Image (spheres, rainbow, N blue to C red):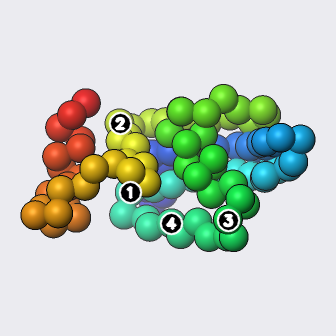
Amino acid sequence: MTATVLLEATGLTCERDERLLFAGLSLAVRPGEAWRIGGPNGAGKTTLLRTLAGLNDLHEGAVRRHARHCWVGHRAGLKGLLSARENLVWFADLN
């Protein structure tokens, strides 16, 4: 049996300042999976994550969210006295 897809992207293409960041990108995220997105500065990692979260407009492609999601960016104001899990729970409760 295949696990339910929580987040699905198909054919994502994004340009910034006339520079192609990614093209034809597709993915499906299922419960319990962990994904690593890597690359040099300016490669489009944050742009991709913001696009998946619905914070950036797509140039091409589609993103479908089949579950509630929470965006925690670079300067999210993480609470130093809380564990990583406690920080995530705190941010999830904001919505």
Name the residue: 18% across, 56% down.
79
Residue 11 image position (x, y, % from top left): 77, 43
The amino acid at mark 4 is Trp
- Relative to residue 85, is residue 41 drawn left or right? right
**First-in-chain label (4 vs 3):** 4
Residue 10, horizontal then vertical, whole percent? 70, 43
Give the distance between the C-alpha atoms of the residues marked 2 and 1, in whole angstroms. 12 Å
| Left or right relative to 17: residue 81 | left
**Sequence-wise, which precedes: disc 4 or disc 2?**
4
Q: Amino acid at mark 2?
A: Arg
Q: Which residue is mark 1?
A: 31
Check disc 3 and report the residue beneath it: 41
**Point 33% across, 48% down: residue:** 76
Q: Secondary structure at mark 2?
A: loop
- Residues 57 and 6: in front is 57
Q: Could you say which disc has been placed on residue 68 in the image?
A: 2
Instruction: Tell me which amino acid carries mark 1.
Output: Pro
Residue 73: image x %, image y %? 42, 49
Which residue is denoted by mark 4 in the rendering? 35
Mark 1–mark 4 distance (CA, rounded to whole Å): 11 Å
Query: Viewed as shown, does residue 53 lie left or right of 11?
Result: left
- Kindly identify the amino acid type of the residue bearing the numbered disc 3: Asn
The secondary structure type at the circle numbered 1 is loop
Q: CA distance from mark 4 to mark 2?
A: 17 Å
- Going from N to C along the chain, the mark reached first, 3 or 2, is 3
Mark closest to the chain's N terminus, 1 or 3? 1
The answer to whether 3 is drawn above or below residue 51 in the figure is: below
Q: Residue at x 10, y 64 (%)?
A: 81
Tell me, for residue 81, which label it has, or none: none
Image depth: mark 2 or mark 1 in front = 2
Q: Position of residue 64 (x, y in %)?
A: 56, 35
